[in-house]
Image: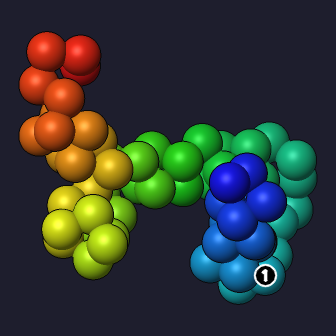
Amino acid sequence: VMENFFGTLKSELFYLNTYESIQELKKDIANYITYYNTDRIKLNLKAMSPIEYRAHYFPNKF
């Protein structure tokens, strides 16, 4: 699962940008992780973001 995430991170973020510093890269990675978990819609999750999907199917857990 992590290999898939890092592959997606590299193709959608890292390879598309040029970074002047490690701090700039860290900031973009943190923002991407937030996007990946809260805003990114996945069709195989019934067109919900991962957080919406978990909250919908496990309402008492989150």
Left or right, 8 with respect to 46, comes to right
Residue at 18 percent of width and 68 percent of height: 46
Badge 1 element = helix
Relative to 30, residue 12 above or below: below
Relative to 23, residue 5 above or below: below
Quadrant that contains the C terminus: top left
Amino acid carrying label 1: it is Tyr
Front-most of 6 and 13? Answer: 6
Relative to 48, residue 34 above or below: above
Front-most of 3 and 32? Answer: 3
| Quadrant position of residue 54 | top left
Residue at 16 percent of width and 39 percent of height: 57
Front-most of 16 and 54? Answer: 54
Residue at 18 percent of width and 70 percent of height: 47
Left or right, 35 with respect to 54, comes to right
Q: Where is residue 21 in the image (x, y as percent from the top left)?
A: 88, 53
Q: Can residue 38 be seen in this view?
A: yes
| Quadrant position of residue 43 | bottom left
Left or right, 4 with respect to 50, comes to right
Residue matched to label 1: 15
Pointer 1 local density, CA inside 10 Å: few below 14, some 14–19, many at least 20: few
Residue at 41 percent of width and 54 percent of height: 35
Q: Is residue 13 visible?
A: no
Q: Where is residue 26 in the image (x, y as percent from the top left)?
A: 74, 44
Left or right, 15 with respect to 34, comes to right
Quadrant that contains the N terminus: bottom right
